[in-house]
Amino acid sequence: QKEVEQNSGPLSVPEGAIASLNCTYSDRVSQSFFWYRQYSGKSPELIMSIYSNGDKEDGRFTAQLNKASQYVSLLIRDSQPSDSATYLCAVNDYKLSFGAGTTVTVRA
Amino acid sequence: NAGVTQTPKFQVLKTGQSMTLQCAQDMNHNSMYWYRQDPGMGLRLIYYSASEGTTDKGEVPNGYNVSRLNKREFSLRLESAAPSQTSVYFCASSEGVGAYSNQPQHFGDGTRLSIL
């Protein structure tokens, strides 16, 4: 079983809609959680970090963490074409483990 | 505002050749990391360094060596390149210490390496 699993893509959403990305992890001692955005051919870019249960909002992005369910999600509100990218979930237990990523396409 | 700088950006090698990938960060970060990224497999940690003079193996260290030259620089060496090492290599740095750090990692632009 993979340590970090993300919902398989690609995910296609219309412009202005909400994109919902999910991530589950296997290690209960994980303490910190990150979402990275990676445009095609580019490096991962940190967009959100979350450390405690609940929601954390930053602009159009909301991260949600539920440690009991070992689940972290990312919502992108009012999706724009510039949000089209692969989103990587990363979970820190004794090392930073990355999911394989979910590719999001926002169609105009 | 350089952040993490990797060189070269592209490289083609023949099987059996050696080369060193260079990485430098100007953020005064303690920890540095080398990852490889292959299609469908996400980022996998090759080696990391919690501080100058220390290095530790990650998930896929075989076929690689590293050197933490000083706080700024962390190099990755392929002694005898193999086609299975064709990948995109990313260097990252973090303010925290080692792999247990809660601090996020910041990535360089990557090196696209092809081994024929």
Image (cartoon, coloured by chain):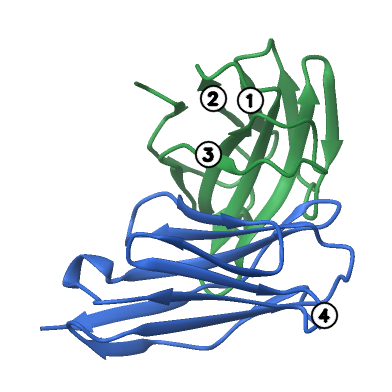
Chain colours: A blue, B green
Q: Which chain is mark 1 on?
A: B
Q: Position of residue B39 (x, y in %)?
A: 51, 70
In the rendered structure, the answer to whether residue B22 lies left or right of residue A17 reads right
Q: Amino acid at mark 2?
A: Gln
Q: Which residue is mark 2?
A: B22
**Residue A65 versus residue A93 in the image, above or below:** below
Residue A87 is at least partly visible in this image: yes
Which of labels 2 and 4 is toward the front? 4
Report the disc number at residue B106: 3
- Ranked by sequence position, the earlier of labels 3 and 1 is 1
* Mark whose residue sits in front, 4 or 3: 4
Q: Nearer the viewer, mark 3 or mark 2?
A: 3
Tag 4 secondary structure: loop
Residue wearing tag 4: A68
Contact (Cβ within 8 Å) of mark 2 with mark 4: no
Residue linked to disc 1? B75
Same subunit, labels 3 and 1: the answer reads yes
Q: CA distance from mark 2 to mark 1?
A: 5 Å
- What residue type is disc 3 on? His
- Say which amino acid is labelled 4: Ala
User: Please, what secondary structure does the residue beneath circle 2 have?
Assistant: strand
Amino acid found under the numbered disc labelled 1:
Ser
Q: CA distance from mark 4 to mark 3?
A: 28 Å
Quick one: SS at disc 1?
A: strand
Name above or below for residue A56 compared with residue B90: below
Numbered disc 3: what chain?
B
